[in-house]
Image: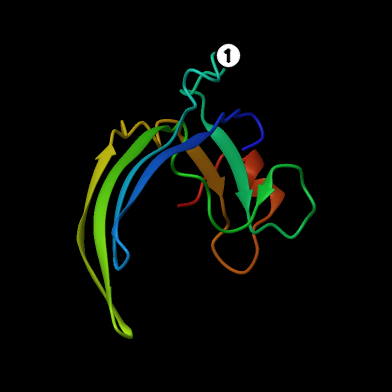
Amino acid sequence: MADINSKRLNWDLAAIYTRNISATMLNEGRFNFTRWGFDEVNSNPNINFGIPESKLKDCCLMVSGCVSGRTVRNTPGVISERQLQFSDILTKVRRNMSWKFGGEYRLDLNNNTGTGGARPDFLFVRPGTSPTIPDFRSDQPGS
């Protein structure tokens, strides 16, 4: 979508603590926080998402705005996904074997507003073999 600015944010924060308990025993603790998201409504204040977007699908002619196949259904997107993760692992070495004991906890916090698909779009497709430009001019959108 050429008229949409999407300022994506992705960052990660991690902390690792390692402790040698003895010559054959090691304890490792990890904490991780990851965030990914974007807000296309606030990053595009000059766009009226109520105005439909018109597209020609699978057209044979080279026309500006001609699309083929899939369209974007998450516009405007307001996505906020976060993940917290904690793990603790104890490693014990005995002779030629190493044993690991531990656990991991992960929490997903997704706050997606569901605004995607708020902008209507019209695909102009002619039933049959190939769509033509007269379908677009006569306002006959396809499915």
Horizontal relation, residue 53 to residue 20: left or right? right
* Residue 31 picture location, percent across and down: 32, 43
* Residue 83 picture location, percent across and down: 32, 42
Q: SS of the residue at dot 1?
A: loop
What residue lies at 58% left-to-right and 13% top-to-bottom?
46
What residue lies at 29% left-to-right and 46% top-to-bottom?
85
- Quadrant placement of the N terminus: top right
Question: Which residue is more in the foreground, 14 or 2?
Answer: 14
The number of callouts visible is: 1
* Residue 6 picture location, percent across and down: 56, 31
Name the residue tied to disc 1: 46
Horizontal relation, residue 16 to residue 131: left or right? left
Horizontal relation, residue 106 to residue 19: left or right? left
* Residue 88 picture location, percent across and down: 24, 53
Question: Which residue is more in the foreground, 64 or 112?
Answer: 112
Q: Residue furthest front?
A: 23
Q: Residue furthest bottom?
A: 96
Residue 45 higher or lower than 59, as above or below: above
Question: Which residue is more in the foreground, 120 or 11?
Answer: 11
**Quadrant of residue 21 within the rendered picture:** bottom left
Q: How is the image coloured?
A: rainbow
Residue 39 higher or lower than 24, as above or below: above
Q: Amino acid at mark 1?
A: Asn
What residue lies at 28% left-to-right and 38% top-to-bottom?
110
What residue lies at 32% left-to-right and 35% top-to-bottom?
112
**Quadrant of residue 4 within the rendered picture:** top right
Q: Residue furthest right?
A: 62
Question: Which residue is more in the foreground, 104 or 82?
Answer: 104
